[in-house]
Amino acid sequence: MTKADSPSHEDLMKLDNFLCFAIYSTNHAFTRVYKPLLDELDLTYPQYLVMVVLWEKDDQTVGSLGERLFLESSTLTPMLKRLEAMGYISRVRDRADERQVRVKLTESGRALREKAENVPRGIANATGMKPAELVRLKQEIATLRTSLLR
């Protein structure tokens, strides 16, 4: 980028030019679209993400769930307790390592997956984007996240 291509200091300080604000406000828009879909499942978005990860691979440690979701155990534990109270998961100490807590789907948790299958389609439809566009955008955002986490 040449100096001529660089935005001015004034342009840099305009809210509409903040990448982080575009992502932040898009997150709010996603929340509005997700809410009615997840209300039907009686789940919050973070709870839904936990369930998705467990549907992908059941019987994981709290630590592995946290790594996959970019969440600390202190954030994840109350959510897991709520999902357990709802009857969707069980939490048990790992027999091989008592320090670890394993999270497993219950029969109700596995059954919930069928009810949740319309959620990704509903979100994709709400974007108005083609599947290839969504894949490209997701890859670019994931690359950005990786760069920011370095």
Image: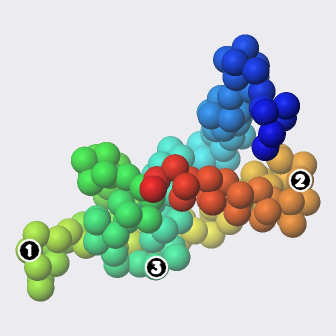
User: Which image quarter is the N terminus in?
Assistant: top right
**Residue 31 visible here:** yes
Disc nearer the start of the sequence (3/1): 3
Q: Give the numbered dot on residue 98.
A: 1
Residue 67 placement (x, y as % from top left): 38, 63
What is the x, y in percent for residue 50?
Answer: 45, 60
User: In terms of depth relative to the viewer, which is nearer, 107 or 19?
Assistant: 19
Amino acid, disc 3 = Lys
Q: Residue at x 71, y 58 (%)?
A: 140
| Residue that protrudes farthest toward the top in the picture | 10
**Are the two marked residues, 2 and 1, in contact with CB atoms closer than 8 angstroms?**
no
Q: Is residue 6 left or right of residue 99?
A: right
Element marked by disc 3:
loop
* Residue type (three-letter) at the residue carrying disc 1: Glu
Q: Is residue 147 left or right of residue 26?
A: left
Q: Kindly report the distance in space between the C-alpha atoms of the residues bearing marks 2 and 1.
A: 47 Å
Residue identifier under label 3: 57
Residue 40 visible? The answer is no
Q: Position of residue 33 (x, y in %)?
A: 72, 40
Vertically, is 142 above or below 92? Answer: above
At horizontal 77% and vertical 56% (from top left) the residue drawn is 137
Picture quarter with the C terminus: bottom left
Q: Which residue is mark 2?
A: 129
Please give left or right for residue 76 compared with residue 123 in the image: left
Q: Secondary structure at mark 1?
A: loop
Nearer to us: label 2 or label 1: 2
Q: Which kind of residue does numbered mark 2 sit on?
A: Met
Along the viewing direction, whichever of 11 and 68 lies nearer the viewer: 11
Question: CA separation, marks 2 and 3?
Answer: 29 Å
The extreme front residue here reads 3
Sooner in the amino-acid sequence: mark 2 or mark 3: 3
